[in-house]
Amino acid sequence: MGIIPSRNLEEQRREKDGITYFDRGIVTGKDGRKYDRFAIQTHFVQRGESQKDLVEKYVRPLYQEGDMLSFGAKVMCMCVESVKTRDEVKPGFWANLLWRFAGINTTGVGMHEPYKMQLVIDMCGLPRVLLAAFCSAVTKPFGKHGVFYKICGKGVGGIDGFYFRSSFDVYKEMALINPDNPTELCNDLFKQTGIPVVLMDANDLQRDQLGKSDGFPLTDDQIQDAMQDNPSGQGDELTPLILIRPVA
């Protein structure tokens, strides 16, 4: 792998045609291919906004032939309204019990919140959640992590929100659920804009690829190489759109 650039926002900051973006620098993949990445700053996207309009407003002024777009999963959730609000979730006995045994991770709240735990119960069913909680408790002393999410499945690991320490008040009252048709969404956006799209749920620990448009120029491994340092940053940077530009 190439050297991952340090994150200095003021040095990276650029402007073009009224668009603010951050040059995250060039990284080198395992196969020797190099990629430049531009993290594009947007407004705080609200529920029901058009993903096509976001691309045309923020990405089009910077786009060059051969570029590819990483579209942030959280923003896509807001666009297609794949969300749940607190008044739609009613924590019951098991949610109020189980959340107390969940650990807080370094990138968010994990399941350490009764509303989020109840949302998982609603999605997966109580028997599966109880099994996942039991297996997690048994394996955690042996250093195994993520067992709860693996057993639950159904995209539970991608749930974000109901997070009392969020930088944005809306995420304290709302949870985002990764859409169940990511490839279709990428294909639709590609047809509307002509820009190859990959939908990414990324943080500083992992970069989960949810789907990509047909004929996307990079393999899955190459996408991971290009996104290796999470160029989208954390949520408060408001840079969910990443232009990936291969370097000759």
Image (spheres, rainbow, N blue to C red):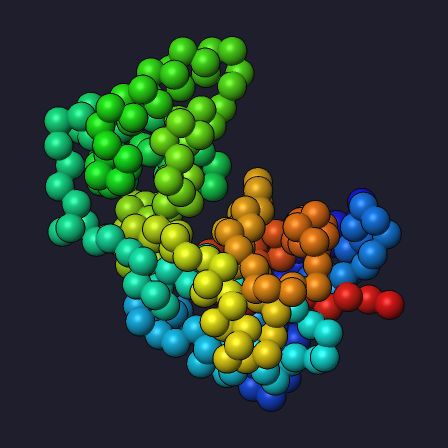
Residue drawn at point x = 53 percent, y = 77 percent: 191
Q: What residue is rendered at 40% in x and 11% in y? A: 138
Which of the pair 182/29 is nearer the observer? 182
Taking the image as shown, residue 63 lies to the left or right of residue 109, namely right
Q: Is 155 on the left-hand or right-hand side of 12? A: left
- The residue that appears at 28% across and 56% down in the rendered structure is 83
Q: Quadrant of residue 204?
A: top right
Residue 120, quarter of the rendered image: top left
Which quadrant is the C terminus positioned in?
bottom right
Whole-percent x, y for residue 195 in the image: 60, 75
Tell me where residue 91 sits by quadrant. top left
Q: Nearer the viewer, residue 77 or 191?
A: 191
Residue 68: percent from left, percent from top:
65, 68
Q: How many marks?
A: 0
Q: Is residue 56 above or below residue 103?
A: below
Left or right of residue 122, residue 202 in this image: right
